[in-house]
Amino acid sequence: MTTKRLRRMFAMILITCAGLAACLGAALYLLTPVITTPSFTVHNDTPHPAAVTATWRDRQKSLGTLPPSASVTFTVNDEAAMQFEATLADGTRIDSETPVYFTAGTRVEARITPERIELTAELIGY
């Protein structure tokens, strides 16, 4: 084989590898929202400690008692609708009224206010 032919083969191999790497990178970028575990962050925006519980399907997760201005983040490897309930230190019980649907790639924020729990959800990467 001539040197010219070897260089051409080497260049073709490099181009093929670069193309495969670009395709793999694009696939990972597009699939990240689909394979990311849903995450939830709960913020206590009240002047009182709040005992918080998350409920979905037939499951419950106690998030403990959040001091004022504190937050907690957790993940759930599932696809369902979630509702939050909080009991403030003065005995007031509030909830999110409407559950929020979550699936892979979802980020949910719950804000506890003195009157209600406000929910927002977004798909990561969209």
Image (spheres, grey):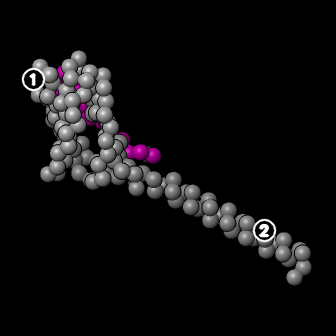
User: Which amino acid lies under the numbered mark 1 shown in the image of this protein?
Assistant: Gly
- Expressed as whole percent of the image width and height from the top left, the position of residue 42 reads 28, 33
Range shown magenta = 112-125
Which of 91 and 10 lies nearest the eye of the viewer? 91
Which of 27 and 44 lies nearest the eye of the viewer? 44
Q: Quadrant of residue 51?
A: top left
Give the residue furthest to the left.
Answer: 91
Q: Which mark is residue 66?
A: none
Give the Cα distance between marks 2 and 1.
72 Å
Q: Quadrant of the N terminus?
A: bottom right
Q: Which mark is residue 11?
A: 2
Report whether residue 99 is seen: no
Residue at the image position 24 percent from the left and 42 percent from the top: 100
Q: Is residue 95 left or right of residue 75?
A: left
Do the residues under discs 2 and 1 have CB atoms within 8 angstroms?
no
Crowdedness of circle 2 by 10 Å Cα count: few (<14), some, many (20+)?
few
Crowdedness of circle 1 by 10 Å Cα count: few (<14), some, many (20+)?
few
Give the residue furthest to the front.
Answer: 64
